Amino acid sequence: MAGLTLREKAAQMVWPSVFGDYTPGDSPQWQRLTSHIVKEKVGGYTISVGSPTEIAAKLNAMQGMSKVPLIFGADLEAGAGFRARGGYFLPNVIDLGGAVVFPPEMATGATGDTALAYEQGRLTAIEGRALGIHIAYAPVLDVNNNPANPVINTRSYGENPIMAARLGAAFIRGVQANGMIATGKHFPGHGDTGVNSHLALPVVTVSRNRLDSVELVPFREAIISGVGAMMSFHGAMPALDSSGVPGTLSHSVMTGLLRNDLKFQGIIISDAMDMRGVLDQYGATEAAKRAVAAGVDVLIQPLDVTETIDAVVAGVREGRYSEATLDTSVRRILQAKHDLGLHRRKLVSLDSLRFIVGDTAHHIVARRIAERSITLVKDSLRQIPLSAASTARILSVTVGRRSDLSAGVAFNGELRSEFKSLRAEFLAAEDPAADYARLERAADSADVTIVSSYVGQNWDAVSANAPQAFAAFVKRLTERGKRPIIVAFGNPYLLQQIPFVPSYVVAWGGFPPSQVAAARAIAGRASITGKLPISIPLDTPARIVARGAGLERSVIQR
């Protein structure tokens, strides 16, 4: 602290974003990175996608350029593999492997098992630290009580605040007992909104009493559990601040509620400062000043690094806040770096990386969570598990984005090991002229038809007419007596569009562990025990699938 200038203090609070990709040393990208570290002296970075070895090597190189150790955070909501996967090599679609990826949080909610939440946190920390990452921007503590939420959805543990609190606290303990800082987000709650804060300003109009009894419950428990960081919500809550400013920029929310009322002493991290929730009304410079004045310690993913540092400094000179305010924030950041041991060792071993990241034992835990999460919401004709012979003609229709190269691959591969005559078809959700009629003809010659949706909660981002066309397709299959089995790998609330289907399975996410688990459950190779951590309203207010619903099935012997 004593050796930092005012501007260097401001720079400690600014953490840009960087891809974990290979970047040549003479490229504009690497030169810009070098400038931010050497000249601007930023305090840390948010790490985006890349392969494990490239991320680790890149972070080591970045650490080597910085006099004060850098601190690296990343969205590790579904484990280190959420960011550190090698992707696919085209055009062969070769899976390049990577860190372990877990099912989304709502899958853990379907298990209700705090031990599994702890294990996910533990393994996230072990793999993340091996990569050189120090802060997990996880867990999501938002209570997803709005089925129309376009951005949280399965990222949440569910709609029960007590369950979300228990699972979130277990995850936090797993992370922080293994050398990494956990981050509760998005304070004070992003669950009850139909607006994506990346695109606009959400407004949550519920009362303070409701906030106390629902939204704030998981955050309180996280603080009791010693969570090291909190990430702010770029949304307005009039019950907390009548001015209408987003929580990130509200002194009443960040300092009054989080610091003073809830006694949180850790690092307050903004959500990405390039999101429209804060930019549209205030612009980047003013938003940065307001965030610091509100009590935010770290500004992540700014539009412009130099301008953001200058803005933080200007706020002091304009009297918006004092240099002592910056001192308090910077002390938290430096203390975190010290507690993480970065003053002793800031580089990671590339040689030991492959014996930690992606370990077989870690994958087993991910598969266990996935299998325990599979939820059979509806099975009126008792089709699941499949009693068909191994020679049965199975039609598996995958509905997903063209860019989702993994959609259906693991699911169909696992099913094909049991049913050799499986026919796999892919339907691009964004295709306005999708040939549903061809698939209906294929269903006519099949013994069993399975339709799997990998489209997330926001169909409109894919195609304006996708929900209607998809629902009409499923309805025609049902009316033709094809008895389709629907598997939701994307939005679990999909049943709202197709309440008439005879069989509905929720797998919670499209990552390979969930695909394999769903196939094993449908084929009768694994038991089904998952329970809905959400309720699903259907076509009338009186019709609803209640939270806690879920039919159980046992393994069958063939």
Image (cartoon, rainbow, N blue to C red):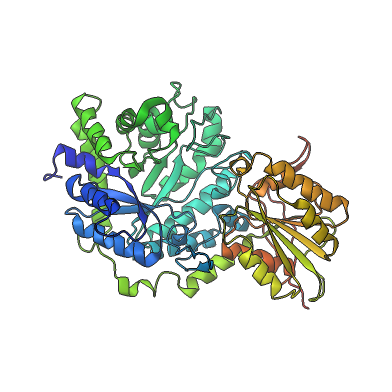
Query: 211 or 72: which is nearer to us?
Result: 72
Furthest residue toward left: 3
**Is 162 left, or right, of 69 in this rendering?**
right
Furthest residue toward bottom: 558
Rendered location of residue 331, percent (x, y): 22, 44
Residue at 24 percent of width and 51 percent of height:
31
**Quick check: 198 above or below 482?**
above
Rendered location of residue 367, percent (x, y): 57, 67
The part of the image, by quadrant, that contains residue 62 is bottom left
Residue at 12 percent of width and 44 percent of height:
2
**Quick check: 549 above or below 206?**
below
Please state, as top left, top right, bottom left or bottom right, where the C terminus lies in the image: bottom right
Residue at 70 percent of width and 66 percent of height:
521
Furthest residue toward top: 243
Please state, as top left, top right, bottom left or bottom right, where the N terminus lies in the image: top left
Q: Is residue 221 visible?
A: yes
Q: Is residue 497 visible?
A: no
Q: How many marks?
A: 0
Query: 551 or 61: which is nearer to us?
Result: 61
The part of the image, by quadrant, that contains residue 386 is bottom right
**Is 450 left, or right, of 310 in this rendering?**
right
Rendered location of residue 152, percent (x, y): 54, 44
The part of the image, by quadrant, that contains residue 555 is bottom right
Rendered location of residue 442, percent (x, y): 80, 61
